[in-house]
Amino acid sequence: MSEAASYDNLNAQNHTDPRPDESAGFVTPAQRKKRTSNWIKFGIPVLIIVIVAAVVGGVVGSRKKHSSAATADSSSPSASAASASAAASSAASAKLALGRFATATESDYMMPIYPSTTDSAAFGSPTFVSSSNSQNSWPMDPFQPSNPDVLTVRQDRPRLIAPAYKWAALPTLIANDPYLQGWNATIFGNATAYYSEPPVIYFLDDSSGILDNARAIKERVKAFSYVYRMTNDTTWVNRLWEEIQNAAGNGTTDFGPDEDRWNSGHFLDTAELSAAYGIAYDWLYDVWSQDQKDMMLSTLLKYGLNPGVTQVTTSAGWWRVNTTGNWNCVCNSGLTIASLAILGDDTTGVAKQLLQTTVDNAIQNCAQAVSDDGTWAETANYWYFGTTGHAEMAASLLSATGSDYGLLKSNPNFVKTGDFHMYVTGATSLFNYGDHGPNKYSTTANSMIFYADFFNEPQYALFQRDQWDAADPWSMFWYDPTIAGAFWDGKPLDNFFDNGLDQWGSMRSTWTDTNALYVAMKAGMNLGHQNHNDLDCGDFVLDALGTRWAGELGSGDYNAPNYFVGETQTDPRWMYYRKMTEGQNTILINQANQNVNAAPTVQHGTSNTTQGPTTVLEVDTNSTAYFTADLSSAYFDATSMKRGVRLLNGRKQVLLQDEIDASESVMWRMHTNATVSIESGGTSATLTLDGQTMKVAMLNPPSGAAFTTSAAQRFPSDPTPPAPDQPNPGVTVLIISLPAGTYTLEVLFNPQWPGSVNYVTPPSVALDQWTLTSHDSS
Ligand SMILES: *[C@@H]1O[C@H](CO)[C@@H](O)[C@H](O)[C@H]1NC(C)=O
Ligand SMILES: *[C@@H]1O[C@H](CO)[C@@H](O)[C@H](O)[C@H]1NC(C)=O
Ligand SMILES: *[C@@H]1O[C@H](CO)[C@@H](O)[C@H](O)[C@H]1NC(C)=O
Ligand SMILES: *[C@@H]1O[C@H](CO)[C@@H](O)[C@H](O)[C@H]1NC(C)=O
Ligand SMILES: *[C@@H]1O[C@H](CO)[C@@H](O)[C@H](O)[C@H]1NC(C)=O
Ligand SMILES: *[C@@H]1O[C@H](CO)[C@@H](O)[C@H](O)[C@H]1NC(C)=O
Ligand SMILES: *[C@@H]1O[C@H](CO)[C@@H](O)[C@H](O)[C@H]1NC(C)=O
Ligand SMILES: *[C@@H]1O[C@H](CO)[C@@H](O)[C@H](O)[C@H]1NC(C)=O
């Protein structure tokens, strides 16, 4: 690829997703609402007693799972399978009796509030209860092609995601399941809110094109067509038509330039609008007049699929080559959904031409964005965009043609990406390293619900169903209401992801408390993440007591010149504070960036503590985990640099240790929203945030080591970036600054938990000697 072409690609990626600005919902610490007693919001009344006797009885029949390894095979149920199913059924009933969980409106990601209880009846192993004769499961899909073919679609409509047999079953399922009931009500509420708004107004944004418009239109299309199909009230059809015409430039306000209304230069926008048209065309196929269908078809071809042909046949489609990230997923998905929708009606051959390339291309790129440990190649936030595109595409291919052609399983490790998402989700928010904007309503984590079903991993759906973004028309058809149990039952508290590209560890004290201790740290390569990484080997976040003590600064300004040019050491991306090593929670040597070509090695250990059916987990005092990394290759002026983090004292305390041999100055840095008060002597500090306290202390401090603080901004001596950095209001950097030398820095974090806690002072142990028991009190 030529220099210029590669530059264009980078530049094109300059438009990937929402920017973290005020209008997009980014909340600065200063703007955060204060925690009040009124911080719990109940989605629906807590107690919904809907217990269906049919569930308990319904153990015979066959469940059309694509993979049935762990599910009792019920076509000829053995006695034990039947009794396991019966137990799971009563677990489902017990959980139904508890109802849905509330969400914490104060946390960035509105984490669920789990009830404090040990209810082993409700919170047993994750399971799909085999049954097809009860009201609680989907009937068999009548479309079962023996030789699926991407150009041979089912005869009935809809084809996409939700065939007619699923719509027919839905009202009964809703009546019997509190999650479907709540989501249905939310979708109706959202559709009602959109109804009274004008059609989405065209707005071309410098950094994200019309992607926000496109996603808003797609969201409305899904909601309006869902509500129409659930009510038969054509008011919704008329309102949807208004939206469709508006996006065609036939409304009362302008929608882009006539020759390219869907902004094909930033093809994500075109792909999302194509998907929106495809869904509208297909879901309401029987309602549209022939004229309306003709108009939609001509508009879709002109602004979506003909430009799509240009993308797949010329170098304009840069995202088709070596792009293991969200662009490939979203672009292929939109073209596929739209093509499937019009296949048979399209006389131009364009839909066929596209379908013959999009599926293979997504298998080679999109599906490979998951590395062999499950980590998404971009960032924790881009996982939402990528997997939403991937899941929509796979689900549409399955419903329309009867196969996903390997999109789900050609990468045998794709299934692990559900674990990536769960472990990267901390107690209060994501381990949000690299570029990440605020989460947005139009991309959700509901791919988890789809993957749960396809891969027979019920824990993924159990995890997602209590999240705030679960209400979505897709969930209505992806969710299998025969699910039972709790995702946390049997779930290890720790996980380590050690593919060389990523290398990160996730450790926590419990899965079911927003006050939990959570530590995640990364090493990994600084390149190879679709230009969304920071120079951040050794970076970590720390949650405890319901707040984040060590946190990330997030994306810089996507519009800033050359923000996405970061392949070599001196590239402009690495001049922006939020992307520089300085802006990370790690060691800085000689006030210089880490080596872009770093290739750390890692080690880790865990007591393998799992959570049981309880939400009030008490772990043994020796329950622990650690993650250590040799980061020497990340530094130019150090012969050796190693960092390790471990949990102590039954996961109540955290030790962060660095072993540094540096020929230039050394700086330990941590970004925090807390108010920092440094004790006299300088080797300990008290952090306060959200009414909570964290004590931080150096153990065995090297001579001269003392905590200081600074604002979160570049050193005056740093090169000036092409555009000013974004401010980081409210953020303080906690620092230990030392001259060149050989040091061991041991920093102990003691969250001030309620009640009387005996805090331990761990022994000093070299990182290479760390084991699970190396820090036990004698
Ligand atoms: C879906 O929600 C709407 C609005 O709350 C309600 O009127 C409707 O009855 C619900 N559908 C079903 C099948 O329960
Ligand atoms: C949908 O409705 C829910 C519940 O009222 C609300 O929290 C959410 O913001 C709405 N979503 C959109 C996109 O309006
Ligand atoms: C809508 O119409 C379809 C097809 O006639 C019918 O099967 C369905 O029951 C109707 N739904 C409602 C809510 O009236
Ligand atoms: C929009 O108007 C153009 C020009 O009259 C027409 O070709 C196209 O089919 C219309 N599309 C929609 C969706 O109204
Ligand atoms: C794609 O990646 C492969 C392997 O890294 C490389 O050999 C090839 O040149 C790349 N292709 C393009 C067009 O960048
Ligand atoms: C500060 O708080 C905001 C809002 O909760 C969060 O997004 C950010 O990551 C925090 N910053 C740090 C350095 O912890
Ligand atoms: C934890 O599980 C891993 C993988 O099964 C195993 O290798 C290790 O020995 C276990 N550790 C403990 C302390 O049980
Ligand atoms: C922790 O202690 C318990 C009981 O004292 C013991 O059974 C267990 O093996 C220990 N676990 C580890 C990882 O040392």
Image (cartoon, rainbow, N blue to C red):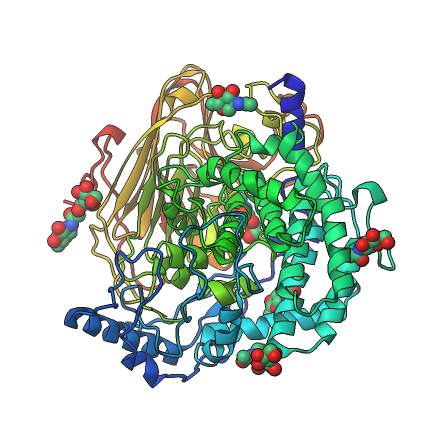
User: In this rendering, would 529 be left or right of 212?
Assistant: left
Residue 11: image location, x then y, percent: 67, 30
* Residue 684 sits above or below residue 515 on the image: above
The residue at 49%/58% (across/down) is: 399
Q: Is residue 278 above or below residue 497?
A: below
User: Residue 242: x and y, percent?
Assistant: 78, 64
The one of 326 and 765 positioned closer to us in this rendering: 326
State whether residue 511 appears in this view. Answer: no
Q: Quadrant of residue 450?
A: bottom left
The image quarter in which residue 699 lies: top left
Pick the quarter of the image with the C terminus.
Answer: top left
Instruction: Give the image location of residue 126, x and y in percent.
Output: 31, 63
**Nearer to the camera, 655 or 315:** 315
Q: Position of residue 313 (x, y in %)?
A: 64, 31
Pick whichever, 608 or 259, lies toward us: 259
Q: Nearer the viewer, residue 708 or 640?
A: 640
Which quarter of the rendered image does ligand 3 occupy?
bottom right
Residue drawn where x is 19% and y is 74% of the image:
83
Residue drawn at point x = 76 percent, y = 64 percent: 241
In the figure, is residue 490 to the left or right of 656?
left
Q: Quadrant of residue 50?
A: bottom left
Instruction: Tell me: 389 left or right of 412.
Output: right
Q: Residue at x 72, y 39 (%)?
A: 264
Q: Quadrant of the N terminus?
A: top right
Q: Is residue 382 left or right of residue 461?
A: right
Whether residue 309 is visible, yes or no, is yes
